[in-house]
Image (cartoon, coloured by chain):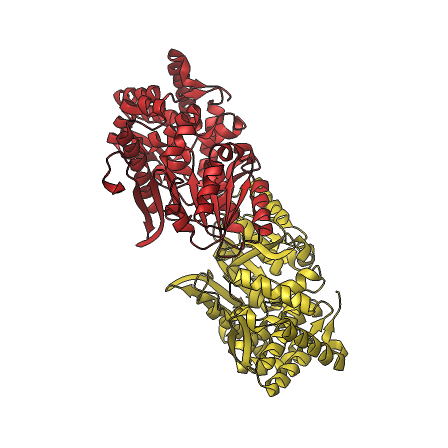
Chain colours: A red, B yellow
Amino acid sequence: MAAHDPRVRQGKRFEMRWNGHRSYDVVATHDLLRRAPGELSAAIGARRVLSVTTPTVDALHGRALQRHLRDAGVDADHFVVQLGEAHKTMESVLALCGHAQRAGLGRRDLLLAFGGGVCCDVVGLAASLTRRGLPYICVPTTLLAQVDAAIGLKTGVNFGGRKNYLGSFVPPEAVFVDIGFLRTLPADDLRRGTAEILKIALVRDEELFSLLTERGPELLESHFASPARVADLVIHRSIALMLDELSRNPYEDRGYERLVDFGHTFSPAIEETSLHRVLHGDAVAIDIAVSCMIAIELGLLPEYEWHRILAAYRALGLPLTSVYCTADVLGRGVEAAVAHRGGRLNLVVPTTVGCATFVPDAASIDRGLLERAADRLALEATARPRATVAAT
Amino acid sequence: MAAHDPRVRQGKRFEMRWNGHRSYDVVATHDLLRRAPGELSAAIGARRVLSVTTPTVDALHGRALQRHLRDAGVDADHFVVQLGEAHKTMESVLALCGHAQRAGLGRRDLLLAFGGGVCCDVVGLAASLTRRGLPYICVPTTLLAQVDAAIGLKTGVNFGGRKNYLGSFVPPEAVFVDIGFLRTLPADDLRRGTAEILKIALVRDEELFSLLTERGPELLESHFASPARVADLVIHRSIALMLDELSRNPYEDRGYERLVDFGHTFSPAIEETSLHRVLHGDAVAIDIAVSCMIAIELGLLPEYEWHRILAAYRALGLPLTSVYCTADVLGRGVEAAVAHRGGRLNLVVPTTVGCATFVPDAASIDRGLLERAADRLALEATARPRATVAAT
């Protein structure tokens, strides 16, 4: 019985539910593509599927996916397309819709996203538009997508120089998170993914934060292969916390005080200004550092907590700042956030490791405060030269 | 007291509700733009608004709308853009999203569609994508949009030669139907709008059907100005029936047996093949005629009911066929409908005036049946030369 074999890593099934209804499952699993039929082909059932992946993921895992679906008797078509941040556009979405049309997908057939956050976002938006909404399933292959981008119900593309300006709220039908894909993930992408775990740990879970700080180097070194129990625990806890936060306000129509906006106030402006040379995970890490500085200045976060947070940055190799982290750029982040959060800033700041509060008004955050925050982070980073991120 | 003045035409407020919740109101009204502030500006409130209209509607009513909003103190921006069937594309949607972005609309601001069905469809889709969903309000100015396109929650654009292949289900915040706009509507557009009223009457309401047949010529002649009570009754009844049908299955996820699909099985193929030379209302009229022929052939509709239906076509000046109504084109309509209705045809056919049933399987509708239907309609139209529609 595989379930009792201690060498087999155990999975976990998370239910995303709201208003008392189950909406979709996020299944953390191992060896997703090894056995056929399996959980993935069971979820697809008798429907036709169009799988979408990038050249990189296709080279690594494309044959495994195709063999798995073929062995399970799934009628599948495969589409390989460049989907980096530069391709997170409506053009990519429409190319996908065109492919779905030519493949003759019916209204009950589905799209399968097999890749990182951009792939899941673009596929989700294409699915939500095609025939006014086809179902879609995500199989995220990056850490960032596994704990954040792929497990929520937001889709989005960049537009007119603005990050995620166009998109939709459309729940996936299911998400399969296989930690094994992290083995082939580039080290920098792995590191960037930990920024989203740090985000949720800092505002919700001191234990997860400590685990991340203490075991982060081993997890990064082994690509989340060992210690296996710790890797599973970190990923499972991140997913559970993220879904718990999302389920309180899945469509963001119950107010704009959202803990998961932590790290997402200044980061869009940094990404946009850098023309995406600073990638999302790094921008989130910098945003968190800026938010901590503001919290210290406003007397909301004690200085000694910042030293613990710094230790986490060091353990994970995350940047504190970049050349794009200036008072001007941070100010633009504040303005854009106010427009996007119904007229108020609602900046999330930690009050201690594991707890957070909101700075409701943009008026509390003047130009001088942003300058001091940027300056201090530049100083901290100079003391530790590796903590600034250059263009990638 | 205006409310007791018999010379003032009365409005009516319809609530679209499902799952026990009110979702949006469709307000049938008169003189919407005359008094400021009024119902429209009250619905907008303190928010900024981007109104979108076509050159034709702008020339007729643009100044009235702008003055109305200005007098009510609404912060409004106006965008005039070509929105015919040829502009029902993602390019138009993205042009609108770009305009909303440049106007700096925040997440609580809104779009206002002021025009026909294409305008409402394109604005609704742009609103649903911008910032993952801005609210929108529709003020339809054509009969077809007032009783059908603008009052539902479907948005859509044509893509890859397929009608409404891309779109979304997004309820408007409110819809204001002012019959007064019909005074300036071209006679042909008015006539085409009656096809959607005929549709709902034939499957749901014998009284409405009789009213339409008997008073149709007067209503068309007067552009629904007189008899005022009959015009209001016809429009109000159509709206109430349409909302009642939509509310049973607003997101089309509770099965594919929908009475409002009557007239919408063959019409997309006719419109696509004609490259939209046959416009929607005419295509719906032809589709209804084809469906009646099939119902007669299958023994579901008695011949004497068809004579009553023919009288309605005559009264309203609706076409029975066109050069694009061939067995080939009708067959393509069947195929596309099967793909779009989850694998079954579910063709709506009347069994008597006011009642309908479904032909579930495409297998019941063979090539010979489609040929006989097309042939008989060509004959009927030859007997009454005006009943065929040429390219417009």
- Quadrant in the rendering for residue A264: top left
Q: Quadrant of the N terminus of chain A?
A: top left
Question: What percent of the width, then of the height, locates residue B264?
Answer: 59, 67
Q: Nearer the viewer, residue B374 or B248?
A: B374
Residue found 38% across the figure and 63% down from its top: B19
Residue found 33% across the figure and 27% down from its top: A295
Residue found 30% across the figure and 27% down from its top: A226
Q: Nearer the viewer, residue B126 or A99?
A: A99
Question: What percent of the width, then of the height, locates residue B96?
Answer: 60, 47
Residue closest to the far bottom:
B304
Q: Does residue B355 appear left or right of residue A248 in this picture?
A: right
Q: Nearer the viewer, residue B27 or B273?
A: B273
Question: What percent of the width, then of the height, locates residue B288?
Answer: 61, 74
Whether A23 is drawn above or below A120: the answer is: below
Residue A73 at least partly seen: yes
- Quadrant in the rendering for residue B365: bottom right
Residue A143 at least partly seen: no
Question: What percent of the width, then of the height, locates residue B56?
Answer: 69, 58
Whether B163 is drawn above or below B291: the answer is: above
- Quadrant in the rendering for residue A286: top left
Q: Does residue A185 appear left or right of residue B383 in this picture?
A: left
Residue closest to the far top:
A383
